[in-house]
Amino acid sequence: MIKQYQTTEEFTAQGNRNTQENVLIVLRKENKRLLMENNILKQAKLVIGQKSS
């Protein structure tokens, strides 16, 4: 932990992440958002299909 502080001057995990870790976090958030959007669209498709029947 002291070595991390000496190189980054931060104790927080966010300040001690490397570029790959930051990219991975962004991609995981985007993936989660896209999965939610996909589920919403699937549900909307079901509702619209029921109304037209």
Image (cartoon, rainbow, N blue to C red):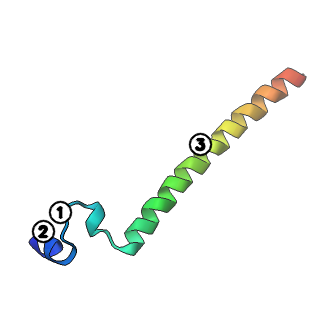
Q: Nearer the viewer, residue 10 or 13?
A: 10
Q: Residue at x 34, y 73 (%)?
A: 18
**Other residues around mark 3 within 10 Å, as few (<14) / some (14–19) / many (≥20):** few
Image position of 52 (left or right of 19): right
Circles 3 and 2, Cβ within 8 Å, touching? The answer is no
Residue 23 spot, x, y in % from top left: 45, 67
In the rendered image, which residue does mark 2 sit on? 1
Marks 3 and 2, how far apart at CA: 37 Å
Q: Quadrant of the N terminus?
A: bottom left
In the rendered image, which residue does mark 3 sit on? 36
Residue 36, compared with residue 28, is above or below; it is: above
* Circle 2 SS class: loop
- The type of residue carrying mark 2 is Met
Residue 35 image label: none
View extreme (left): residue? 2
Which of the 4 quarters of the picture holds residue 21? bottom left
* Circle 1 SS class: loop
Image position of 52 (left or right of 2): right
In the rendered image, which residue does mark 1 sit on? 11
Q: Earlier in the sequence, mark 1 or mark 3?
A: 1
Closest to the camera, between mark 1 and mark 3, is 1
* Circle 3 SS class: helix
- The type of residue carrying mark 3 is Met
